Image (cartoon, rainbow, N blue to C red):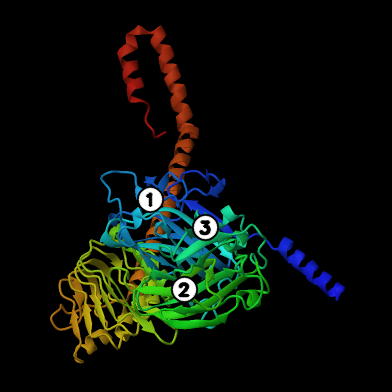
Amino acid sequence: MLKFHFLLFFFAFKIAFCLPAPYVTRISCGAQNDVRSSPTNTLWHKDFGYTGGIRMEANRPSYITPPLGTLRYFPLSEGPDNCYNIDKVPHGHYSVRIYFGLVKEPSFDNEPLFDVSVEGTLVYSLPSGWSSHDDEQAFVETLVFLENGTTSLCFHSTGHGDPAILAIEIQEVDEKAYYSGPGFGRGTIFRTSKRLNCGDQNPKFDVDYDGDRWGGDRFWSSIMTFGQNSDKPISTKSTIKSASAAPNFYPQALYQTALVSTDNDPDLTHTIDVDPNKNYSVWLHFAEIDPSVTDVGQRVIDISINGNIVFRDIDIVRIAGGVNSALVLNTTIPVSGRILTITLHPTTGTHAIISAIEIFEVIPVESKTLPEEVKALQSLKLALGLPLRFGWNGDPCFPQQHPWSGVDCQFDNSSNKWVIDGLDLDNQGLRGFLPDDVSQLRHLQSINLSGNNIHGLIPSALGTITSLEKLDLSYNSFNGSIPESLGELTSLLTLNLNGNLLSGKIPAALGGRLLHRASFNFTDNAGLCGIPGLPTCGPHLTVGAKIGIGLGACVAVVVIATCITCWWKRRQNILRAKRMAVRDAPYAKKRTHLNHIQMTRHHHNGHHHEHTRTAVENGPPLLV
């Protein structure tokens, strides 16, 4: 038996000291350099490359928020949806906390109201008055599984001021942290609604308690009473057993204070405001630190939530294994109203006791949009030069309250994902081109890009979107011919290509569709031909034939230019050879000798001067 206990101690020691430190990253939004905050000397990384927005000076709305001087501000002109996309986050379970800030400018709205989503799921809507509460309303905290190597945290404008984010913390916790039974895991997100440390005078973070880093550095609000004269705080300095244990790693100090009911009201009752029609996970913490209770059976309580008993006959000493030992109880309940009331009623003994309370809203994780379709929309955003006001950040279809402007979604049961079934971007001043990646939106039923200035060719890949029923590219600057592949769209009922710069013969398959109640418009394209109402086509060449002729013409020009160059060089060589031959000919030598004689005579016989000059000027005859 002694050996067994020694082995247990050995493995516990090994686990405690060999576990790697949890992954943590902290971002000081808007900071241009890394910052350390007092009094804990906590490192906050500079804000670079995660998002758009504008760096601004910050005011802290609450003592809870870290003492940082900048924030990231997202004006509506940059779009209604803005996100922090943080890469290289290892797979795991995380506490994600987002602190809100106030822009340090009197002209700005000092209390913006906006929505927050984590990984595409809406988790929080800032309530009116949040900036005047020195409690958890200064931040939102969630427990979420992150599996894709990235974290997407988005802020959605609601028309009541622009989002302003002070800081972000991402802290790894145990895989089983806050395990709440069936339904726990990757299908849910826990949002912290309330954390109360009962009987303590000062709110604290885990770090202030010297808590284990695997606890996620939780913030605990202090509460000294549930109601006037209904209870009293007690405390102890005794060591609390079984407190900082996996998977939740609660700090020991959490159990060294408590609230105990009094003779005025034997029950302990606390009411918390919540959102209606939601599920809530309730965690209740106990340690028998009351010196008047020393053994099993001296205090037994029933615990009710909203009038329903959820735990009967709770004997803390018996269940925890003694006095000064931690006990945690958890249950998940649906709440239809706006309040959650916890009541502890003593059935044995005269008073109830409690050390701490945690309440989480249980949020179902939203299904995301198919990744390949998200990628296709991002490619389309770049190719079309979509204005900043569109945003197009985060997930296109979720949160449902904030889909991307101009994007229609539907749920695909086969993939259990959301897909894009409509694009409506008409008259938006778009000036780019339509990329081939649009074909990855294979569930599209309608595309409307009319009234823009989109140029280039119509992608033949559009012909692979077999579900397409409406294609409106009218009044743009598309050129070239109409792809033959559009004739393969058997579901196509409306095709508007009028008002472009298209040319060539309309594909025969499209022309034949006009007899099947389809509505096609090809007018105002000077170069189109081939159906009634348009000019008759001459000899029609396919695009491939035109390319071949163009390449052949280019080759012919190169060959002709090469021949002319070679002929010119050859002619120059011949002329040069003739000039050299003339200089070396016999008559050239004789002529030079004769000139020398005539010049000699000029010096000795002045009488013949005129005759000699004439002979020299005229030169000797070339015939000998």
Is label 3 in a helix, a strand or a loop?
A: loop
Instruction: Please give the residue where the numbered disc 1 appears in the rendered image.
Output: 61
Depth check, mark 3 against mark 1: the one in front is 3
- Calculate the distance from the C-alpha at mark 1 to the C-alpha at mark 2: 36 Å
Q: Quick one: 287 or 373, which is closer to the camera?
A: 287
User: Dot 2, how many residues are within 10 Å of its Cα: few (below 14), some (14-19), or many (20+)?
Assistant: many
Instruction: Give the percent coordinates (x, y) of residue 551.
Output: 38, 66
Residue 379 in sight here? no
Residue 432 in sight here? yes
Q: Amino acid at mark 1?
A: Pro
Instruction: Please give the residue where the numbered disc 2 appears in the rendered image.
Output: 267
- Calculate the distance from the C-alpha at mark 3 to the C-alpha at mark 2: 20 Å
Q: Quick one: 51 or 291, which is closer to the camera?
A: 291
Q: Amino acid at mark 2?
A: Asp
Q: Earlier in the sequence, mark 3 or mark 2?
A: 3
Instruction: Give the percent coordinates (x, y) of residue 624.
Output: 42, 33
Q: Earlier in the sequence, mark 3 or mark 1?
A: 1
Instruction: Please give the residue where the numbered disc 3 appears in the rendered image.
Output: 200
- Calculate the distance from the C-alpha at mark 3 to the C-alpha at mark 1: 23 Å
